[in-house]
Amino acid sequence: MAFPTGWTHKVAITIAASDIDGDLTDWTLVFDQSFDSVLTQVDGPLDADGTRASIDGGGDVRFSSDSAGNTQLAVDVRRWDTDNNPANALCEVAVKIPTVSSSVDTTIYMWWGKSGETQPGAATTYGQYNAYDSDYELVYPLSENSGSRFDRTSNQETLTPNSTPTA
Protein backbone atom coordinates (compact mmCIF):
# COMPACT_ATOMS: atom_id res chain seq x y z
CA MET A 1 0.00 0.00 0.00
CA ALA A 2 1.26 3.47 -0.83
CA PHE A 3 2.23 6.00 1.79
CA PRO A 4 0.39 7.36 3.81
CA THR A 5 -2.37 4.74 3.58
CA GLY A 6 -2.37 2.77 6.81
CA TRP A 7 -0.27 5.17 8.88
CA THR A 8 -2.47 5.99 11.86
CA HIS A 9 -0.61 8.82 13.60
CA LYS A 10 1.16 12.01 12.61
CA VAL A 11 2.62 15.06 14.27
CA ALA A 12 3.58 18.41 12.83
CA ILE A 13 7.20 19.46 13.36
CA THR A 14 7.75 23.18 12.88
CA ILE A 15 11.06 24.86 12.16
CA ALA A 16 10.84 28.49 13.26
CA ALA A 17 11.89 30.95 10.56
CA SER A 18 13.54 33.02 13.29
CA ASP A 19 16.04 30.16 13.77
CA ILE A 20 17.10 30.20 10.10
CA ASP A 21 19.62 32.76 8.81
CA GLY A 22 18.80 32.33 5.12
CA ASP A 23 16.59 30.17 2.92
CA LEU A 24 17.82 26.58 2.66
CA THR A 25 17.44 24.03 -0.14
CA ASP A 26 17.71 20.26 0.37
CA TRP A 27 18.58 20.77 4.01
CA THR A 28 19.06 17.76 6.27
CA LEU A 29 17.47 18.19 9.68
CA VAL A 30 19.00 15.87 12.28
CA PHE A 31 17.11 15.57 15.54
CA ASP A 32 16.77 13.42 18.62
CA GLN A 33 14.10 12.80 21.25
CA SER A 34 14.62 16.26 22.77
CA PHE A 35 13.52 18.01 19.56
CA ASP A 36 9.79 17.70 20.15
CA SER A 37 8.03 16.79 23.40
CA VAL A 38 5.47 14.71 21.44
CA LEU A 39 8.15 12.10 20.81
CA THR A 40 8.57 11.15 24.47
CA GLN A 41 5.16 11.93 25.90
CA VAL A 42 3.00 9.15 27.29
CA ASP A 43 1.27 7.51 24.31
CA GLY A 44 3.75 9.18 21.94
CA PRO A 45 5.70 7.25 19.30
CA LEU A 46 8.58 6.35 21.64
CA ASP A 47 6.27 5.02 24.40
CA ALA A 48 6.62 1.26 23.78
CA ASP A 49 3.50 0.28 25.72
CA GLY A 50 1.45 3.36 24.83
CA THR A 51 -1.63 3.46 22.64
CA ARG A 52 0.23 5.30 19.84
CA ALA A 53 3.57 3.48 19.91
CA SER A 54 5.81 3.22 16.89
CA ILE A 55 7.72 0.10 15.92
CA ASP A 56 10.93 -0.28 17.94
CA GLY A 57 13.70 0.44 15.44
CA GLY A 58 11.55 3.00 13.60
CA GLY A 59 10.38 0.82 10.72
CA ASP A 60 7.09 2.69 10.50
CA VAL A 61 8.50 6.22 10.82
CA ARG A 62 7.96 8.35 7.69
CA PHE A 63 7.98 12.06 6.90
CA SER A 64 6.16 14.32 4.47
CA SER A 65 6.32 18.01 3.63
CA ASP A 66 2.52 18.33 3.62
CA SER A 67 -0.28 17.41 6.00
CA ALA A 68 -1.94 15.05 3.51
CA GLY A 69 1.25 13.04 3.02
CA ASN A 70 1.37 13.66 -0.74
CA THR A 71 5.08 14.55 -0.70
CA GLN A 72 7.11 11.96 1.17
CA LEU A 73 10.60 12.93 2.35
CA ALA A 74 13.80 10.86 2.45
CA VAL A 75 14.73 9.74 5.95
CA ASP A 76 17.64 8.10 7.72
CA VAL A 77 16.50 6.55 10.99
CA ARG A 78 19.86 6.22 12.72
CA ARG A 79 18.43 5.14 16.05
CA TRP A 80 14.87 4.53 17.27
CA ASP A 81 14.62 2.83 20.65
CA THR A 82 11.17 2.81 22.22
CA ASP A 83 10.76 2.21 25.97
CA ASN A 84 7.85 1.53 28.33
CA ASN A 85 9.01 4.71 30.09
CA PRO A 86 9.17 7.15 27.15
CA ALA A 87 11.55 9.41 29.08
CA ASN A 88 14.17 6.66 28.62
CA ALA A 89 13.56 6.24 24.88
CA LEU A 90 16.14 7.37 22.34
CA CYS A 91 16.05 8.40 18.72
CA GLU A 92 18.29 10.01 16.14
CA VAL A 93 16.77 10.79 12.76
CA ALA A 94 17.91 12.70 9.67
CA VAL A 95 15.28 13.93 7.20
CA LYS A 96 15.95 15.92 4.03
CA ILE A 97 13.66 18.93 3.67
CA PRO A 98 13.36 20.40 0.14
CA THR A 99 13.07 24.04 1.27
CA VAL A 100 13.31 25.78 4.62
CA SER A 101 12.28 29.42 4.73
CA SER A 102 13.96 32.15 6.73
CA SER A 103 10.83 34.33 6.53
CA VAL A 104 7.97 31.87 7.19
CA ASP A 105 7.91 28.88 9.56
CA THR A 106 8.46 25.55 7.78
CA THR A 107 6.36 22.56 8.87
CA ILE A 108 6.98 18.92 8.08
CA TYR A 109 5.00 15.92 9.31
CA MET A 110 6.18 12.75 10.99
CA TRP A 111 3.97 9.68 10.48
CA TRP A 112 3.96 6.37 12.35
CA GLY A 113 1.65 3.59 13.42
CA LYS A 114 1.56 1.14 10.50
CA SER A 115 2.33 -2.33 11.78
CA GLY A 116 4.72 -4.58 9.93
CA GLU A 117 6.58 -1.78 8.15
CA THR A 118 10.32 -1.49 7.66
CA GLN A 119 12.34 1.52 6.58
CA PRO A 120 12.69 2.03 2.82
CA GLY A 121 15.83 0.47 1.36
CA ALA A 122 18.92 2.66 1.81
CA ALA A 123 19.28 3.39 -1.93
CA THR A 124 15.58 3.94 -2.67
CA THR A 125 14.00 7.35 -3.25
CA TYR A 126 12.96 7.83 0.38
CA GLY A 127 15.77 5.82 1.96
CA GLN A 128 18.83 6.62 3.99
CA TYR A 129 21.22 7.66 1.18
CA ASN A 130 18.77 10.26 -0.14
CA ALA A 131 18.42 11.95 3.25
CA TYR A 132 21.68 13.76 2.39
CA ASP A 133 22.44 15.89 -0.66
CA SER A 134 25.44 15.21 -2.90
CA ASP A 135 27.58 17.73 -0.98
CA TYR A 136 27.83 15.28 1.92
CA GLU A 137 31.00 13.24 1.54
CA LEU A 138 30.67 11.28 4.81
CA VAL A 139 28.20 11.09 7.70
CA TYR A 140 29.17 9.27 10.88
CA PRO A 141 26.47 9.54 13.58
CA LEU A 142 27.63 10.23 17.11
CA SER A 143 25.26 7.51 18.35
CA GLU A 144 27.75 4.96 17.00
CA ASN A 145 30.19 5.26 19.88
CA SER A 146 32.05 1.97 19.77
CA GLY A 147 33.80 -0.03 17.07
CA SER A 148 33.73 0.90 13.40
CA ARG A 149 31.66 3.82 12.18
CA PHE A 150 29.57 3.32 9.06
CA ASP A 151 29.00 6.13 6.58
CA ARG A 152 25.29 6.92 6.14
CA THR A 153 25.73 8.32 2.60
CA SER A 154 25.86 6.33 -0.62
CA ASN A 155 29.68 6.61 -0.53
CA GLN A 156 29.66 3.82 2.10
CA GLU A 157 33.04 4.58 3.67
CA THR A 158 33.87 2.79 6.93
CA LEU A 159 35.88 4.46 9.67
CA THR A 160 37.82 2.05 11.86
CA PRO A 161 39.26 3.73 14.96
CA ASN A 162 42.78 2.96 16.17
CA SER A 163 41.73 3.36 19.79
CA THR A 164 38.43 3.50 21.69
CA PRO A 165 36.90 6.92 21.00
CA THR A 166 33.70 8.02 22.71
CA ALA A 167 30.98 10.30 21.43
Image (cartoon, rainbow, N blue to C red):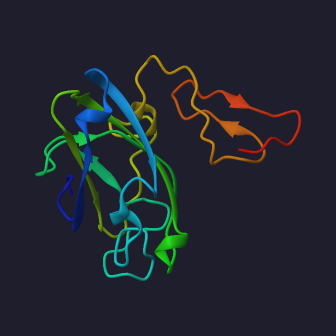
* Residue at the spot 23% in from the left edge and 34% down from the top edge: 17
Residue 133 found in image quarter: top left
Q: Position of residue 145 (x, y in %)?
A: 72, 47
Q: Is residue 124 above or below residue 52?
A: above
Q: Is residue 7 visible?
A: no
* Residue at the spot 50% in from the left edge and 21% down from the top edge: 136
* Residue at the spot 23% in from the left edge and 45% down from the top edge: 108
Which corner quadrant holds the N terminus?
Answer: bottom left
Q: Nearer the viewer, residue 107 or 96?
A: 107
Q: Position of residue 109 (x, y in %)?
A: 23, 51
Residue 46 found in image quarter: bottom left
Which corner quadrant holds the C terminus?
Answer: top right
* Residue at the spot 37% in from the left edge and 72% down from the top edge: 41
Horizontally, residue 50 falls left or right of residue 156, namely left
Q: Position of residue 5 (x, y in %)?
A: 17, 60
Horizontally, residue 156 falls left or right of residue 126, namely right
